[in-house]
Amino acid sequence: MSFIFGQHLIKPSVVFLRTELSFALVNRKPVVPGHVLVCPLRPVERFRDLHPNEVADLFQMAQRVGNVVEKHFQGTSLTFSLQDGPESGQTVKHVHVHILPRKAEDFSNNDSIYDELQKHDKVEEDSQPHGGQKMTWQQKRLSSGHISNKEASRQEGILDKFQGKRKWVSSSRMSSH
């Protein structure tokens, strides 16, 4: 079963936690080690369109994932970011929360992380196939909605932190909850 994330199809091997209403996934191109995303299962473009129970579940999962990611990557703080609409920097038309574990002096200017997130999302939006042509939304959906096994294994430890807690999926195992 694949997950829908805006115009992307996400492989189950990238999803490490799932509830009835949300899922968490490793980021294909993390801005910092441990950068992950939490999304509602229902493909919703704008935050205002989420139902109250989806908002509650999304942020309960973000809190839980943030606690684990911060410890696992030896962070001392967390940055939570949600861009809501194109002018805010949202490029994937699906509500999602970026969770980034932070350390002292990981950026010389603390707010530079937002510039990096903007660049990160812009690169994703502008990605092109080897032929140099702009990708159609269908090509993006089929080719760029996953990370490589190597990249996923770098963050494999996150998966283990959630084993047996709720429904989750990894490349090597799937719960029956």
Image (tube, helix red, strand yellow):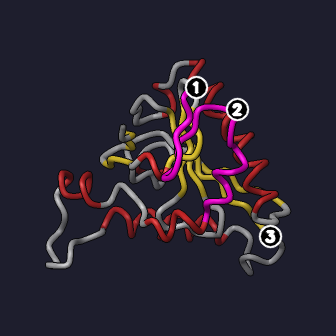
Q: Dot 1 lies on which element?
A: loop
Q: Pointer 3: residues within 10 angstroms few (<14), some, or many (20+)?
A: some
Distance of mark 3 from mark 2, alpha carbons?
23 Å
The CA span between labels 3 and 1 is 35 Å
Label 2, residues with CA under 10 Å away: few <14, some 14-19, many ≥20: few
In screen coordinates, is 138 left or right of 18? left
Q: Quadrant of the N terminus?
A: top left
Q: Quadrant of residue 46?
A: top left
Instruction: Give me the residue at 62% from left, 51% from top.
Output: 81
Amino acid of disc 2: Gln
Write down the region rendered in magenta.
Answer: 155-177
Q: Which of the two discs, 3 and 1, sits closer to the camera?
A: 1
Give residue 146's position: percent from left, percent from top: 39, 57
* Residue 157 part of the magenta segment: yes
The residue at which mark 1 appears reads as: 177
Task: Identify the residue at horizontal 72%, vertical 77% (top origin).
Answer: 107
Q: In this rendering, is residue 50 above or below 85?
A: above
Label for residue 103? 3
Which residue lies under the disc numbered 2? 60
**Front one among 159 and 35:** 159
